[in-house]
Image (tube, rainbow, N blue to C red):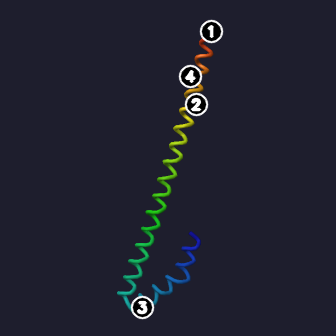
């Protein structure tokens, strides 16, 4: 994220300001390209987060299954002791 901010400050902003003053068509192209790049980053991060959520959900389900099994075992033991 910091790298992106630095790139904006040092490279894109000066080019964009120049383009806005001298060449509106170029400015439009720069803005369009920036927007495409931002969307690309958003899609990539969304996919990574979705993948991570799926991994964590799978792990939570595994732990839940283990805990349920242990609870069932303990419940059976308690029931056997109370007989």
Upstream in the sequence, badge 1 or badge 4? 4
- Estimate the x, y position of residue 9 in percent, counting from the top left: 55, 80
Q: Which residue sits at x=58%, y=30%?
A: 67
- Check contact, mark 1 vs mark 3: CB within 8 A: no
From the viewer's perspective, is the residue at label 3 or at label 4 nearer? Answer: 4
SS for callout 3: helix
The correct choice, above or below, for 71 with respect to 11 in the image is above
Q: Residues within 10 Å of mark 2 (few under 14, many from 20)?
A: few
- Residue 35 is left or right of residue 79, and the answer is left
Q: Residues within 10 Å of mark 1 (few under 14, many from 20)?
A: few
> Separation of disc 2 and disc 1 at Cα?
22 Å
> Separation of disc 3 and disc 4 at Cα?
73 Å
The outermost residue toward the right is 81
Mark 2 = which residue? 67
> Separation of disc 2 and disc 3 at Cα?
65 Å
Quadrant housing residue 60: top right
Mark 1 = which residue? 82
> Separation of disc 1 and disc 3 at Cα?
86 Å
- Estimate the x, y position of residue 66 in percent, counting from the top left: 57, 32
Mark 4 = which residue? 72
């Amino acid at each position: 994220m910091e790298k992106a901010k630095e790139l904006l400050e040092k490279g894109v902003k000066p080019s964009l300001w120049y383009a806005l003053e001298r060449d509106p068509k170029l400015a439009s192209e720069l803005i369009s390209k920036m927007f495409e790049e931002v969307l690309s980053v958003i899609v990539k991060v969304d996919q990574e987060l979705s993948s991570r959520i799926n991994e964590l959900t799978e792990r939570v389900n595994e732990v839940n299954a283990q805990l349920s099994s242990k609870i069932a075992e303990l419940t059976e033991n308690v029931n056997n002791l109370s007989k």
